[in-house]
Each structure stands twice: as C-alpha cells, then as structure tokens.
Amino acid sequence: MSKKSIYEHYKTKILNNDNYTDEKKKQYLEQIKILETKNSEIILNTYHFSNLVGIKWKTLKKIIDDTDKFYYNFQISKKTGGKRTINVPNRSLEICQKYIKEKILDNVVLHSSAHGFANNKSIITNAKEHINNEMILNIDLKDFFPSISRKKVFYVFNKICGYDNSLSHCLTNLVMYKNGLPQGACTSPIISNIVTFKLDLRLKKLSDKLGINYSRYADDITFSGDKNTINSKFLFFVKSIINECGYQINDKKTRFESKYGRQEVTGLIVNNGKVSIPKRYLQNLRKDLYYIKKYGIEEHKKRNNIYNAFYQEHIKGQIMFVYSVDKNKGIKLLKEYNLIFENNN
C-alpha cells in the first residue's frame, strides 16, 4: 500500500468509526492532514503507538514516565584516554526506539554535508571532500550526544515530523537519557544529524561564501581550502556559529593541518591526492596478526589485557576497513588473517 493510500485508509476509518465524536474525528483528521504534508508515519496517540510497536500500554506508560530506569549502563575506554559511558536500552525500550528510527526518523531529510550515519555516506566519503587542499581545519564538538537537549529533540517530533504536543513529549522521552541522547540507542545517531541541520546549513553557507569545503561526520567537523582563508580569524567565526547553535568546541582537539605535513580527516590521510590508511594503523594491525600467529589469539589477548569477547571479529572488521579504503592492502591482510585462523581451527 502506498503512503497516499495509507493516509486515505486512516481518514476513511476515522470517519466511519461511531465511537468517535464529531469533535474527535475532526481532531484526528486534522492531525493526519499535518502528517501527510510532512510525509510522516501516522501515529494518533500513545495508545495507538503501543499497538503499532506491539508493547502493552501499561508497559509503555511505565517506560515513558521514567525512561532512565530502562537502560543498562557500562563503560568502555576511549582511544584518547578516559572512559565513555554506554547506555543500552532494555528489550521493550529498544523495540520502541527501533520503530521510531525506522518509521519516523529515517524519513527525515538530512543536510548533504552530514556523512556520519547517513545513507551512502561514510568516513571515506567524508575524507574525500578534503583531498588536495592547502589547509585543513579539524574541529571536535564537545560532549556531542549528551549536549543535545530535550527541547531540540521535541522540535524534531513536533515541528519537523508534525506530531501533536502530547505525542511529541512521549516520543522525546523514549529517545532521551538524563536530558541528553543516550550513547547506545539506535535513535541517537540519526537524531543528532537531524538536530544539527541548522548548524550544517550555517557552516556550509559560510564555507560556500569563502570558497572552501565543509563536511561533518558526527561530532567531527572539517574545513579545507586556501591557507589564507582557513586561519585563526576563520576559526573565531566558526566557533561563534557553533556556540550560537548550542554546541561547544573541544579546544584540545582543534587542529590546523598544512599540505606540507600530514593531513588527517576522521582517521584517514588525505595527502597526495588520495585517501589512505595511516601507517600506524596498518603497523598496529600487522603487529596484532603477527603475535596472534605466534602465540595464538587467547594468549595474545592475555598478554595485552584484551577482554573483548569478539576480538577475532574486531580484527576482521579492521581488515575490512582497510579493504574499503585500499583494496590491495586489504586483500593481503585478509589472506594472512585466513591463514592464521584456518590453522588455528
């Protein structure tokens, strides 16, 4: 059934429902008209939502009333040091969030400059935007997910998607954790892209005016172009726009990179007219494969205090990442990987 047919089906169903008063019919028909103009999924109220996702109304109400209780939290180590807290929703909340993502949020149009968590985009497409430029400026947004406010998320459901105030509040509760976006919910990445549309719009407009390139991958913002344009004065203007949009820069991670040194964008090198894997990444991966071959994977994990139960899959994932950037290097590493684990099995 087409989207248009679905809207018409609901309109007919409401008009023929004798349990609704004329006033209620009028209210629902007006809601559907708004949702139709927004191309949004038809959800009339939270009770209707509970039926759509297959969660009992009483269970859904408990989750909405105190969503924070329905997360399991654990910590992982950051590459730069310190710990990152991951918030994993329980099964019922996860079902709600999956529905919200697939049926509502995935229909929202993102800014073309967003390369993270977007269809047909990746860190590779993000890096390609900045090949062959005199100067690159890398900026990191501080506490990105936690800094995205309830007000911004409510705006997504209410104004962008067209749901009424009551339902928008409920949907907002279902995707938040302690007044920020949870690290670990499937809805957080796409919401972060939607609410950052205004920031992308303003930074892209500034970049186009100055004749430079702009892209964003999650909380990583990159500009590239002429060295006389991308300087401390430019950074001042960018910082002002970011602050006005409700975000902060992590000053420790702000980097200017000249073409005479190494230029890196979201972990990839963009010097010499192409995107390539950093040497240190390849060296570390080859070293891991060497010691896994020498000692076996369990002994290697023990020697290096590695507690990842899916470490073999992690290594395979790193190799496939190399393959996606440099096919020849990826094939060599994959052959080595297969030899090692075929012999161990």
Image (tube, rainbow, N blue to C red):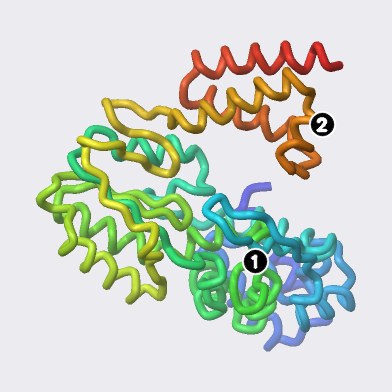
Q: Residue at 50% x, 65% y: name it.
A: 144
Q: Earlier in the sequence, mark 1 or mark 2?
A: 1
| Secondary structure of the residue carrying numbered label 2 | helix
Q: Would residue 44 be seen by someone viewing this image from the given angle?
A: yes
Image side of residue 235 versus residue 286, left or right:
left
Dot in front, 1 or 2:
2
> Which disc is residue 85 wearing?
none
Residue 9 seen in the figure: no
Q: Quadrant of residue 14?
A: bottom right
Of residues 344 and 70, the one nearer the viewer is 344
* Residue 21 higher or lower than 238, as above or below: below
Image quadrant where one finds the C terminus: top right
Which residue is at a point 63% across and 17% down the rendered structure image?
334
- The x, y position of residue 106, in whole percent, is 58, 53
Kind of residue at disc 2: Glu
Horizontal side of 23 relative to 160 (left or right) equals: right
Classify residue 231 as left or right of residue 24.
left
Residue sitting at 39 percent across and 52 percent down? 216
Q: Residue at x 68, y 76 (%)?
A: 173
Look at mark 2 in the image and give the residue it sits on: 298
Mark 1 vs mark 2, CA separation in Å: 33 Å
Q: Do the residues bearing badges 1 and 2 touch, measured as CB atoms within 8 Å? A: no
Amino acid of disc 1:
Pro
Describe the element under mark 1 as helix, strand or loop: loop
Q: Which residue is mark 1?
A: 182
Question: What is the crowding at mark 2: few (fewer than 14 residues within 10 Å), some, or many (at least 20)?
Answer: few
* Quadrant in the rendering for residue 308: top right
Q: Position of residue 321 (x, y in %)?
A: 56, 30
